[in-house]
Image (tube, coloured by chain):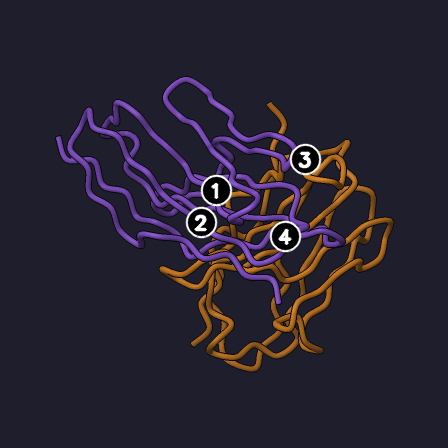
Chain colours: A purple, B orange
Amino acid sequence: GENVEQHPSTLSVQEGDSAVIKCTYSDSASNYFPWYKQELGKRPQLIIDIRSNVGEKKDQRIAVTLNKTAKHFSLHITETQPEDSAVYFCAAKFEGNEKLTFGTGTRLTIIP
Amino acid sequence: EPEVTQTPSHQVTQMGQEVILRCVPISNHLYFYWYRQILGQKVEFLVSFYNNEISEKSEIFDDQFSVERPDGSNFTLKIRSTKLEDSAMYFCASQRDVGGGELFFGEGSRLTVL
């Protein structure tokens, strides 16, 4: 069935360093891969997304890379800041479905 | 900026009681969803709704759950007879187009079943 695995579950990074979160998906026909940031007690908010016809997308300090052959995609945050501390969820939209299937989340802590 | 709104923000109910969670999606959006998130866990899909009918539902969305769009703006999730394990944050979301457009989430309704 549809499955998205996410690693690591927790990540602590010194302020200013980079953070990388990785996800793998099960269905090779998946075509849309968003990343959501969720602060404590808040709604998930989209921070970046990528479609299957693109290998990389960047938005200021945030980038996402997609490797369709290996069926994995990664979130890269550079020059991390304390406000980057949150739980990050990857997700995938599988071919023929409307829903998003979410990964299990990564709690990112930026150490000042 | 338009946003998805949900009420109530928190509801406490006794096991076996009926609960209705309400959502007002963004006005020009066509696709509506309910997701839930048990505390500390991932966001799980419950149901999607398009053109006034359910288009997809998960195994979680059993006969105790129903959705309705009673008028042009509200989108409701009803749980007929709540169980302890229904305690979670329920997020409504809407999407303008299918095919991978951004999903906009509401602030969530926290349901506590005692």
* Vertical position of residue B90 compared to residue A85: above or below: below
For badge 2, the amino acid type reads Cys
Q: Are marks 3 and 2 in contact (CB under 8 Å)?
A: no
Q: Are marks 1 and 2 in contact (CB under 8 Å)?
A: yes
For badge 3, the amino acid type reads Gly
Q: Position of residue B94 (x, y in %)?
A: 67, 42
Using the image as rendered, state which of residue A104 and residue B114 is in the foreground.
Answer: A104
* Disc with the residue nearer the chain's start (1 vs 2): 2
Q: Residues within 10 Å of mark 3 (few under 14, many from 20)?
A: few
Secondary structure state at the residue bearing disc 3: loop
Q: Chain of mark 1?
A: A
Count of numbered labels shown in the rendering? 4
* Vertical position of residue B80 compared to residue B112: above or below: below
Secondary structure state at the residue bearing disc 4: loop
Is B11 on the left-hand or right-hand side of B2? left
Q: Position of residue A25 (x, y in %)?
A: 53, 54
Q: Which residue is mark 1?
A: A73
Q: Quadrant of the C terminus of chain B?
A: bottom left
Nearest to the eye among marks 2 and 4: give it: 4
Secondary structure state at the residue bearing disc 2: strand
For badge 1, the amino acid type reads Phe
Q: Which residue is mark 2?
A: A23
